[in-house]
Image: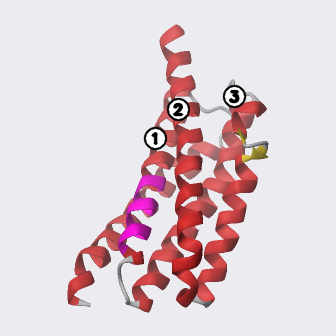
Amino acid sequence: MDKDIYVYFLLGNFENFLIRSKKEFTPLLEEDKLSLEDGIRLLSTFKNSLNKIDHILELVSLSDDKDLARMALAISSDSLAWLLFSLPTLYEKFPIFPEEFLVFQENIIDLIGTNLIDIENLLDKPDNIEFILMNIKDNIKTISSVIETLLKNLQRNVLEN
């Protein structure tokens, strides 16, 4: 555990980040309208969350600590689930085209869901993490790039208005 103390610290930091973010944005997502500025902040938070997942999963892949792997997977799962259920709300409230949600002809929501299932499966068997982790990390980067594109488009809308 001593050599992984930094990763445990990052996990605690990430968990606090998720709690604060959900507390801030959940009420906004439940409102009928969402300002472009709030949408930009939300997408920035999603992107930041995905970057944290990527970094933590990279560090976990270098560790032999199975409890650490379970914690990282659980927090990553929580973050992806929040993204999965929140992203469609943005689609309804902003000038985002359905094509912007496609990656290799697959909807980004489906890709997030697939990764969420993969992570949930790894929670039961973290011994298989090395085999599946690279695919998950690649998909996290892909999802992050789609979020980045959506973020830039919303920022452009704010500048034009």
Residue 96 badge: 3
Report which quarter residue 16 is drawn in: bottom left
Reply above or below: 122 against 144. below
Q: What element carries label 1?
A: helix
Q: Residue furthest left?
A: 2
Question: In the rendered structure, which amino acid carries the disc numbered 3?
Answer: Ile
Give the residue drawn at x 44%, y 69%.
57
- Identify the mark at residue 153; answer none if there is no mark: none
Q: Are marks 2 and 1 in contact (CB under 8 Å)?
A: yes
Question: Mark 3 and mark 1: span between their CA atoms?
Answer: 16 Å
Q: Which label sits on residue 44? A: 1
Alpha carbon distance from label 2 to label 3: 10 Å
- Return the residue nearer the eye: 7 or 133: 133
| Position of residue 62 measured from the top left corner of the image (x, y, whole percent) | 36, 78
Q: At which x and y percent is residue 22?
A: 51, 56
Q: Nearer the viewer, residue 25 or 13?
A: 13
**Residue at the (26%, 90%) spot, across then down:** 1
Residue 87 location, x and y as percent? 66, 46
The C terminus: image quadrant:
top right
Most common SS among magenta residues: helix
Residue stretch rendered in magenta on the structure:
50-59
Task: Locate residue 61 relative to residue 131 in the image: left or right.
Answer: left
Q: Residue at x 58, y 32 (%)?
A: 150
Q: In which quarter of the image is residue 99?
A: top right
Q: What residue type is labelled 1?
A: Ser
Residue 56 magenta-highlighted: yes
Mark on residue 151? 2
Q: How crowded is mark 2: few (under 14 residues within 10 Å), some or many (20 or more)?
A: many
Tell me which amino acid carries mark 2.
Answer: Leu
Q: In this view, does 104 lie to the left or right of 129?
A: right
